[in-house]
Amino acid sequence: MRRIKALASALGFPETFPTGVDVIQENCGSGAFDTDWVLEPIDPSASGTNPDFVLETLEPRLSYVGHWCMAASTFNDTNGTRLVAEPCSPTDSRQLWNL
């Protein structure tokens, strides 16, 4: 697990929301949408051979949903594709990231 720590700004989302809510960039510590994210490998047993990962909330946000993942809003490969928060799902390829 790799924790993402921002120094000047943070990425977060509101506590009460539907799925697909925009991820918002704001000043760190403002408290409005503070969210801690972790980089979770898709296959931890792959020992570095699978570069895919998800960006997942460190703590569950709502007890009935659990952890949330950062996802692309669409599959369109264009500038301006929004980042959204969705309940983590291993079948949602919009949540896969790769370095």
Image (cartoon, rainbow, N blue to C red):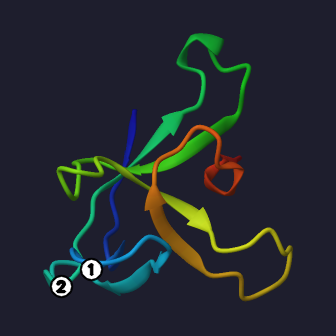
Q: Quick check: marks 1 and 2 in contact, CB under 8 Å?
A: yes
Query: Where is residue 29 shown, x and y percent of the image?
Result: 15, 78
Task: Tell me if residue 80 comes above or below residue 37 in the rendering.
Answer: below
Along the line of sight, the residue nearer the viewer: 53 or 67: 67
Residue 91 placement, left or right of 29: right
Query: Where is residue 23 shown, x and y percent of the image?
Result: 44, 77
Residue visible at 23% across and 77% down? 16
What is the secondary structure assignment of the residue under circle 2? loop
Residue kind at label 2, given as amino acid type: Ala
Residue kind at label 1, given as amino acid type: Pro
Query: Where is residue 73 shown, x and y percent of the image?
Result: 64, 74
Mark 1 or 2, closer to the camera: 1
Give residue 14's mark.
1
Task: Tell me if residue 23 comes above or below residue 75 in the rendering.
Answer: below
Q: Residue 44 appears in which quarter of the rendering? A: top right
| Tag count | 2
Along the line of sight, the residue nearer the viewer: 52 or 94: 94
Residue 75 placement, left or right of 36: right
- Label 2 Cα crowd, 10 Å radius (few <14 / some 14-19 / many 20+): few
Residue under circle 2?
Answer: 32
